[in-house]
Image (spheres, rainbow, N blue to C red):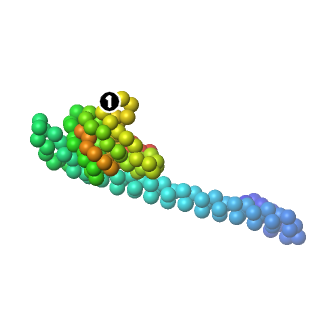
């Protein structure tokens, strides 16, 4: 667009050169605006994922008793109880129970999904919310190595 503008200045009577220069400048401005909007949306998405990853309190099973621990204190193999309204503290597999889970923060899907022990519908993602019932989840990823952490790393 700069070269076209210079050419149009050297040949002032050529209206076609000015038209091309104007279109090139408008295209460049629009491309920069679109890039800035996309970058802003990406940063907002990353901020949304970071909020989803925020520190949650987990109810870890210790034998038959439950103890409240921060989600960052969970280790692979820990059993965690999640009831309706709870945020699942980390990636894992359902080992007991059936629940409806809101995964919209991760997948964008507005309809809740059913997660149950065994089979191909047992995997749950940290940061999602249990909408109904109660499940016991075995943690399969250490803190900092969860699905949300990897997604934030990509953004």
Q: Is residue 12 visible?
A: yes
Q: Is residue 101 above or below residue 18?
A: above
Q: Is residue 140 visible?
A: no
Please tell me which residue is depicted at 26% across the width and 41% down the height of the picture: 135
Please tell me which residue is depicted at 27% across the width and 37% down the height of the picture: 97
Which residue is at the far top? 119
Badge 1 is on which residue? 118
Which residue is at the far bottom? 13
Q: Is residue 155 above or below residue 15?
A: above
Residue 95 picture location, percent across and down: 26, 33
Q: Is residue 16 above or below residue 46?
A: below
Which residue is at the far right? 13
Residue 70 picture location, percent across and down: 20, 48
The local secondary structure at tag 1 comes to loop
Left/right placement of residue 144 relative to residue 22 reads left
Left/right placement of residue 11 relative to residue 32 reads right
Residue 4 picture location, percent across and down: 77, 61
Please tell me which residue is depicted at 14% across the width and 43% down the height of the picture: 66
């Amino acid at each position: 667009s700069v070269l076209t503008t210079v050419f149009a200045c050297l040949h002032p009577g050529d209206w076609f050169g000015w038209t091309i220069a104007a279109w090139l400048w408008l295209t460049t401005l629009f491309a920069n605006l679109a890039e800035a909007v996309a970058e802003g949306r990406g940063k907002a998405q990353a901020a949304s994922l970071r909020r989803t990853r925020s520190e949650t309190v987990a109810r870890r099973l210790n034998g038959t008793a439950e103890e409240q621990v921060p989600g960052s204190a969970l280790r692979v193999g820990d059993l965690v109880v999640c009831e309706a309204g709870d945020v699942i503290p980390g990636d894992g597999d359902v080992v007991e129970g059936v629940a409806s889970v809101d995964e919209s923060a991760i997948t964008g899907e507005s309809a809740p999904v059913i997660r149950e022990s065994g089979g191909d519908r047992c995997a749950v993602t940290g940061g999602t919310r249990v909408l109904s019932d109660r499940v016991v989840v075995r943690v399969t990823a250490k803190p900092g190595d969860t699905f949300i952490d990897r997604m934030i790393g990509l953004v």
